Amino acid sequence: MEKKLKPATLCVRAGYQPKNGEPVELPIIQSTTFKYDNSDEMAMLFDLKKEGYFYTRLQNPTNDAVAAKIAALEGGVGCVLTSSGQAANFFAVFNICEAGDHIVTSNEIYGGTYNLFNVTLRKLGIESTFVSPEASDEEIQAAFRPNTKALFGETISNPGCAVLDIERFARIAHRNHVPLIVDNTFATPVNCRPFEWGADIVTHSTTKYMDGMATQVGGAVVDSGNFNWEEGSFPGLTTPDDSYHGLTYTKAFGKMAYTTKLVAQLMRDLGSIPAPQNSFLLNLGLQTLHLRMAQHCKNAQRIAEFLSNDPRVAWVHYSGLPTDKYYDIAQKYLPQGSCGVLAFGLKGNRETAIKWMDSLQLINIATHVADARSCVLHPASHTHRQLSDEQLREAGIAPDLIRLSVGIEDADDLLDDIQQALDRL
């Protein structure tokens, strides 16, 4: 029996094992096309009767090695890399939904994902119902319809830092014969593996902690292989696909049905792939993910404690604080720490938040988050500026919320910068 490796080892070793005389670092296969000796071999690849490479839009050795590493980290059977985290969430849902279908989703999710579900998917004929992650089982159940195909949530919400009760959401999803899709970007598989709590599909914006250096934009969709698609209503997976000679994914590929369809159908037609160069950069970040997450959490804990004790701060949301309403649930799902992102509000108004941010000298004002460098954002003025205060609250975002992404610099330097900016208010 193969030894089960720990996450730290998987970060460094999974996905690519060089053979005798081969490079120890994952090579960049920067080629669109792959050559074969005869036509029959190529035909078998196009018919999904043989594994191999023929065009990078569908598969590439560099991309596949990094996907295999992420699948190993999450404990999944398959993973597909995408060109962004937004593309990952779109593909995760669109792989099992079509016009006339419906999803239920937590309302405490990234603003871009909220807009993807509430606006773009509606234009494609897929409706969404938003529920509070703190709603009762009965309230969440009431949101389901006969045509509901998925339940969606974020392990740690962006930017509100709410912690999802994954086990409860999985139970509700499975009672309705649909999968639970969890965006695990902020926690990463180093701090939480949603499949262990009943989730079926996991997504990531690999742009964030997995990369960690702000060098590439990417996403990932990971399949647990545990959901029985035959029990629900998923004709795209359980009935013949005319575009592949009547092939039925669940019959032909078993636990790999969802992943195979995503590649063979959606990537074939929509093509949101990462460049092999980007996957190479992502892999460099993954090799230190376990080390960086520990430092992010250590620094964020210190800063959250400092802010919670400063009289100029109105409130702080960070699940590592014993006073935080998600503290107990975080101890269950995130016992090693959550992430480096915290949310807080200053006493005053929007202008107070802007003045504090403009006074920072070390911490960057940036749209990015989950980077080695600390950065800060005021969603109401930046990423969510199109929403009214009422709409912000409906999305779980207070108008005064400041999202602080704590990096891996020396915590004392970060605290000094935060302190001097507060002193200027």
Image: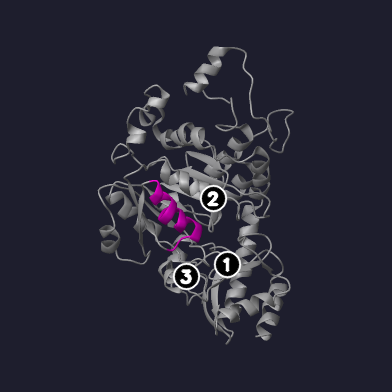
Stretch in magenta: 108-124
Task: Give me the disc on residue 397.
Answer: 3
What residue lies at 51% left-to-right and 36% top-to-bottom?
267
Vertical position of residue 173 compared to residue 16: above or below: below
What residue lies at 42% left-to-right and 46% top-to-bottom?
93
Q: Is residue 188 left or right of residue 153?
A: right
Specify the amino acid type for callout 1: His
Across and down, in percent, residue 103 comes to 35, 51
Look at the magenta stretch and give its main secondary structure. helix
Vertical position of residue 235 compared to residue 361: above or below: above
Across and down, in percent, residue 321 comes to 52, 74
Residue sitting farthest toward the bottom: 311
Task: Give me the disc on residue 382.
Answer: 1
Q: Is residue 117 magenta?
A: yes
Mark 3, secondary structure of its residue: loop
The residue wearing badge 2 is 85
Specify the amino acid type for callout 2: Gly
